[in-house]
Amino acid sequence: MRSIPGKIMLWLLAVAAAMAGVTASLDKSEITKGETVTLTITADGDEVTFPVIDQIGGYPVLGTARRSFISMENGAVRRSVSKSYTFAPMKDLDIPSYEVTVDGQVERTPPLKVRVKAAPATTQRASAALRIDLQKRELYVGEPVKMTVRLRYRADKPIVASKIAPPQFDGFWIKQLGQSRRERSGEWIEERQDYLLFPQKAGELTVGPMTGKIGRQVASSLPGDPIFNDPFFAPLMNRIEWRGIASNTVPVKVKPLPGGVTLYGRFTLKVAPEKREVSAGKPLRFTVTVKGEGNIEDVGKFTPQIPDATVYADEPAVKDYIQNGRYGGSVTQLITVVASRDFIFPSLSLRYYDPQKGKVVQKRTAPISIHVTGSVPTPQPVTADGVKEENFSAVSEKRPREDHVAVGWPIWLFVWLGGLIPGWWAGRKGWPRLPDSSKKSEVARRVLRAKEDRDLFALLLPYMGRDPEIDKALKDLEANLYGGARNRVDRRRVAEAVAALEWEREERGR
């Protein structure tokens, strides 16, 4: 059996679609390169589901619109629904057939064709053009790049209005810079608008196309009284006829930032407490400030974790600016802490890629020690049956020695029991083996268990200036954390010093 010729097949599809109540049409079947064309699909029915069309022939859909119509024919109500898809093909294109569901039945639109003519050169007196220019075409993720959009049209044409649609490009965050500027240059009028683009993902991306339209004034002839044809009424009778245009596209290569960072530029980080001393249960505010040049909008929210305290982290407030052609600004965040005892506001960090240094840079703030007056004593831990656990550990070496014992009991018996019972209890509770003078202090135990220099630094900071051993440890830890040193800290000696200070504090409180 011979195959049906292609033209006959297309004709049969078109007839079948028309009989089914589904039609497709173009606002123009021939355009000049750079102009837009609109495909409109119309269906008769109560329940119509149109296809989801993101691109036509490889060209992105720049906009959609939906309309409904109700009419009466021979006493019957007819409902029609249409959906339009606007795109900008750059060469001749065959528009395929699409499926439309009408009242539960699947119908197909007829295929169509668009012919695209070459755009005339400027010297051939082209009427209008829309163009995108980028400062760079190879970027890092988050690196801002300036984009200038130019809409040009001839001054000798009856063009009375122009519009540029806001850009929407996949993979970019876009910020408009100022307002559009319009100026005349010779026989041309040019409208310019600047934007900043921030690529959000790596890969081969595309900027464009953008769309715009120009409106020219055309006369409307009205039948009737010839008085309305008088030039005096011309401005009232004229109408604006719009013509859509599309811009070029620009390929962009976006490289990922090294080290897994998301910030590009140069920044500073600062934390400022409202004060260094606060009453128990009263709020204390800390102001976190990030300043610099780069994608400042991508600075995240800081939410520090502070043991035994309630932390409220506000949303960051961003203020941006353009200085000397560079984008930057500041991010300010308030963090409120409510505590019942002394605490350490921890170190905050910010990592970013510095293009001048060509590497990832990390900024850190120093921990901040806050004294809380009227502190609530630390409660003793409670077991599952509600009984408080008591420390039967040996007493610190700095505690005064008991010079007498109960009459009638041998001294060696007290010595033996004093070692046996705490050892049995500690093994029963799973305590680690600690220096004798540090067993009385919970902080001392945490000092011994601290695995990171940062954690040990935070534990010791409240004791600064109260013991030479602790002061030396803090100095060594600070050099490790912020100076790249590798000092070794004797945790046992530091734990002994902490335990002694805690015992002295308890003695003064008795």
Image: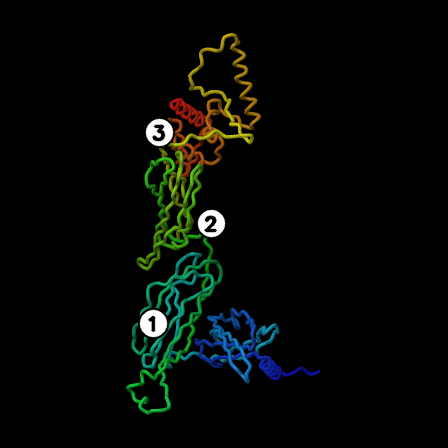
Label placed on residue 191: 1
Q: Count the labels in the image.
A: 3
Foreground mark, 3 or 2, reads: 3
The kind of secondary structure element at disc 2 is helix
- Relative placement, left or right, of 17 versus 67 is right
Residue type at numbered disc 1: Glu
Location of residue 368 by image quarter: top left
Name the residue carrying label 3: 465
Q: State the separation of the CA atoms marked 3 and 2.
A: 39 Å
Tag 3's secondary structure? loop
User: Horizontal and vertical percent for residue 128?
Assistant: 38, 77
Image coordinates for residue 53, horizontal then vertical, percent:
53, 70
Q: Nearer the viewer, residue 308 or 137?
A: 308
User: Residue 376 placed where, x, y %?
Assistant: 41, 32
Per the image, the residue denoted by label 2 is 259
- Which amino acid type is shown beneath numbered disc 2? Gly
Whichever of labels 3 and 2 marks the residue nearer the N terminus, that label is 2
Q: Residues within 10 Å of mark 3 (few under 14, many from 20)?
A: few
- Amino acid type shown at disc 3: Gly
Quarter of the image for the N terminus: give it: bottom right
